[in-house]
Image (cartoon, helix red, strand yellow):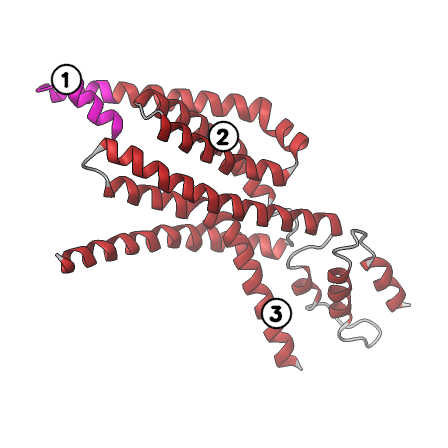
């Protein structure tokens, strides 16, 4: 959204050029994210988990998210958001997701099959649906109120 | 007694599902979906999205820190003690050994008691019970 509004202001009256610039920007963002994730997964994930342990590695992502939030709050710009989002997305793919899967280690086979399939099918979709319901309910309350 | 055992199994399954759901759903999907709600709410102004969105993001990070700390602590506790979540459910389906119908229950309770000492003595106790 930030990038879209920036490119729209960079190319006033030329929606085609704005869309093209936005597409280029998003393409570059995707490439950079995937490259960084690939490098981190190849070289960093195992070493970080072995060095820090699972608990500290799990805490790493929210701590960095907190730091990134504070930095973007203090220096709000598209470039800063780009760098922070790049780092967070790469860390999410390379560190947070493997850690989440490792959490199934102290569970039995039955739990792995039952709980994991339940979480993947119902839990994750249910979480999204619950937030959508919350959002729609909030909109409805605002509509009724005004 | 059977009814109580079934109820215990049910409670156990619910706890396991809650544990795993907290680990996956709370740490990923809720914040993602909430982020989309925040983006949609401030769709009119990029400046408002940045300033307000970051405050919400920092609040969510605090919640994530708590959940990660709790889940990480549980993981460390279970791995150091050798406790396997859901193992009791599989054990309860086994045939009774030497007429001790609730041997699996003894195994579970002792393994839970050993969680804080750090040493998995459950197998020794189980072996002595079988003798």
Q: Specify the farthest residue to the right.
A: B131
Which numbered dot is residue B38? none
Most common secondary structure along the magenta stretch: helix
The answer for how far apart the CA atoms under marks 2 and 3 are is 38 Å
Q: Position of residue A27 (x, y in %)?
A: 32, 21
**Chain letter for the residue marked with disc 1 in the picture:** A
Which numbered dot is residue B9? 3
Which numbered dot is residue A91? 2
In which quadrant will I find the N terminus of chain B?
Answer: bottom right
Which of the 4 image quadrants contains residue A34? Answer: top left
Estimate how packed mark 1 is, as few (under 14), some (14 to 19) or many (20 or more) residues with alpha carbons within 10 Å: some
- In the rendered image, residue A9 lying in the magenta stretch gets the answer yes
The answer for how far apart the CA atoms under marks 1 and 2 are is 33 Å
| Residue at figure coordinates x 11%, y 19% from the top left | A12
Please give the residue where the numbered disc 1 appears in the rendered image: A11
Q: Nearer the viewer, mark 3 or mark 1?
A: 1
Q: Position of residue A131 (x, y in %)?
A: 33, 52
The answer for how far apart the CA atoms under marks 3 and 1 are is 64 Å
Task: Identify the magenta region.
Answer: A1-22
**Chain letter for the residue marked with disc 2 in the picture:** A
| Residue at figure coordinates x 63%, y 39% from the top left | A54
Q: Is residue B54 left or right of residue B128?
A: left
Estimate how packed mark 3 is, as few (under 14), some (14 to 19) or many (20 or more) residues with alpha carbons within 10 Å: some
């Amino acid at each position: 959204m930030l990038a879209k509004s920036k490119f729209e202001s960079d190319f006033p009256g030329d929606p085609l050029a704005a869309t093209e610039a936005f597409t280029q920007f998003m393409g570059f963002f995707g490439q950079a994210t995937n490259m960084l994730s690939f490098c981190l997964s190849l070289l960093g994930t195992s070493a970080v988990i072995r060095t820090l342990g699972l608990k500290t590695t799990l805490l790493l992502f929210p701590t960095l998210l907190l730091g990134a939030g504070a930095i973007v709050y203090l220096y709000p710009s598209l470039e800063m958001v780009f760098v922070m989002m790049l780092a967070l997305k790469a860390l999410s793919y390379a560190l947070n997701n493997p850690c989440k899967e490792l959490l199934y280690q102290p569970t039995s086979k039955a739990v792995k099959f039952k709980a994991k399939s339940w979480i993947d099918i119902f839990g994750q979709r249910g979480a999204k649906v619950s937030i959508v319901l919350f959002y729609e309910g909030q909109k409805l309350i605002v509509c009724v109120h005004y | 007694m059977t009814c109580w055992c079934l109820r215990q199994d049910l409670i156990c399954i619910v706890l396991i599902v809650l544990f795993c759901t907290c680990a996956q759903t709370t740490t990923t999907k809720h914040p993602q979906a909430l982020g989309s709600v925040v983006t949609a709410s401030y769709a009119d102004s990029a400046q408002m999205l940045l300033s307000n969105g970051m405050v919400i993001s920092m609040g969510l990070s605090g919640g994530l820190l708590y959940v990660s700390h709790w889940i990480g602590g549980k993981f460390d506790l279970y791995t150091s003690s050798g406790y396997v979540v859901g193992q009791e459910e599989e054990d309860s389906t086994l045939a009774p050994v030497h007429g001790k119908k609730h041997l699996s229950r003894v195994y579970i309770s002792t393994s839970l008691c050993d969680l804080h000492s750090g040493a998995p003595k459950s197998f020794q106790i189980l072996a002595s019970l079988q003798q």
